[in-house]
Image (cartoon, rainbow, N blue to C red):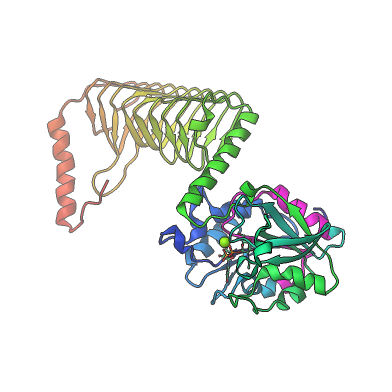
Amino acid sequence: MTGRTSLTIVLAAGEGTRMQSSMPKVLHPVAGRSLLAHVLEAAPKGAGASLAVVIGPDHGAVAEEVKRLRPDATTFVQRERLGTAHAVLAARDAIARGADDLLVVFGDTPLITAATFARMRAPLKNGAALAVLGFHAADPTGYGRLLVEGDQLVAIREQADATPAERTIKLSNAGVMAFDGHKALQVIEEIGNANNKGEYYLSDAVGVVRQLGLEAVVIETSEDEVRGINTKTQLAEAEQVMQTRLRQAALDAGVTMVAPETVYLAADTRFGSDVTIEPFVVIGPGVTIADGAVIHSFSHIVQSSIGKKASVGPYARLRPGTSLGEGARIGNFVETKAATLEAGVKVNHLSYIGDTDIGAGANVGAGTITCNYDGFDKHRTTIGSGAFVGSNSSLVAPVTIGKGAYIGSGSVISRDVPDDALAVERSQQTNREGGAKRYREMKTRGKTPKGG
Ligand code: UD1
Ligand code: MG
């Protein structure tokens, strides 16, 4: 909304006891990113858009997540949980700076969209003091009910304070509110706690606004968009809604999926054109798939970049730091990690490729293993372009296989192989003693082997 500044306050001080978890509620993931990250993604960003997050006293991890996602944000600690209005006032200093629009949203409502925030800001521009997001709840039990007269919102009645007649109202408070930022502080400070729970209800802002002779309106949305997460069941339900959205967006962008309902995407998955994803693929955070690439069934991919026309799987596992060049091929039962495979590299069967760089056009035979870990440290393997590694070879890192070199099947390579050399190394005895010697030395120096 051009020209108007905004402050978004995200309430995230809750303990989330019903999640049955030691992790703060808003850090639980949906589609590979935290509930909080989804809310911050939808909130206004850019010039003139500031952000405050209200967290609980023991929520250092939440503060870190805020800092990671929005370094410009301010976090405020609510020391005692006295209600949603009290939580908003924890960010009093930010409100006092007087943005044009003040948006309040809960940190556990990950399906909210940027479009809805924009719709809520529109009435403020036209003079309303408050816009409340409402929805028709299938079962409104527990929600604040919206009391309307014509197109005017007159009050919100919390479940605990509602009359039996009011409890039949289905139009409910989603919890998202947009205030005229220059009047917000006056309104919210006016809210008292004379109710059945003795809490400061933010929903009472509507009554205050009306008493001041100002206007409050309702903006409606679907129940799906405002689902709040309190339990693991609700977390799973939100995941389904989010996956449906992500699959639809991918299909709309031209990704081919014959069984999209079996494909799991992350909120940040990026696709080029003409990408195909076969059934039963799981894509975690940080994945980019370039034009014409094909991901075959039962593959699992995290923090990886897949080049144009590359082919992955079936049954491949791409772990963080994998980068596949154009036309590279990763076949069945291949695991990669921190590995760069340049254009046209083939690793087609039953291999582990970790901490490795492979030059263009190299062929890595079935069952090749990069032995990257000696019990203490990880070491890199380099395979030159056009090299051929015969089946069932072990490359004991740190090691470099030269460009165009040929490694005979079943070799155990623990010394560098020059460019274009032919190496057939089956002196396992020597190699094993080499590794064992270092292992013994490290133990003598009091080091304990770490788990691989
Ligand atoms: C609230 C609304 C209700 C609405 C419902 C929608 C109030 C009084 N009621 O009820 O009208 O229908 O949400 O889901 O606003 N929080 C704090 N500090 C506090 C209290 C709450 O940070 O002192 C945070 C919680 O972490 C949570 C959010 O505010 O993210 C909402 O609090 P919650 O206790 O869940 O309110 P509801 O009873 O669900
Ligand atoms: Mg709630």
Q: Nearer the viewer, residue 328 or 293?
A: 293
Q: Which residue is at 46% across, 22% downward?
A: 344
Residue located at (61% from left, 33% from top): 248
| Residue plotted at (68% across, 57% down) | 169
Q: Ligand 1, what quadrant?
A: bottom right
Q: Which percent across, then down, holds residue 221?
A: 70, 49
> Looking at the image, which is closer to me, 340 or 25?
25
Q: Position of residue 426 (x, y in %)?
A: 17, 25
Residue 44 visible to the viewer: no
- Residues 45 and 264: in front is 264
Q: Nearer the viewer, residue 82 or 445?
A: 82
Q: Is residue 91 left or right of residue 181?
A: left
Against 35, residue 273 (above or below) is above
Q: Is the residue 293 above or below the residue 157 in the image?
A: above
The answer to which quarter of the image holds residue 98 is: bottom right
Please check the rendered image and state whether residue 101 is part of the magenta-colored stretch, yes or no: yes
Task: Report the side of 244 relative to 405 (left or right).
Answer: right
Q: Quadrant of residue 203?
A: bottom right
Assess whether residue 84 is covered by the magenta stretch. Answer: no
Counting from the top left corner in percent of width and height, residue 133 is at: 71, 56
Please give the range of residues in magenta: 95-124
Quarter containing the C terminus: top left
Q: Is residue 401 visible?
A: yes
Residue placed at 40% from the left, 21% from the top?
386
Q: How many marks?
A: 0
Rendered location of residue 101, percent (x, y): 77, 62
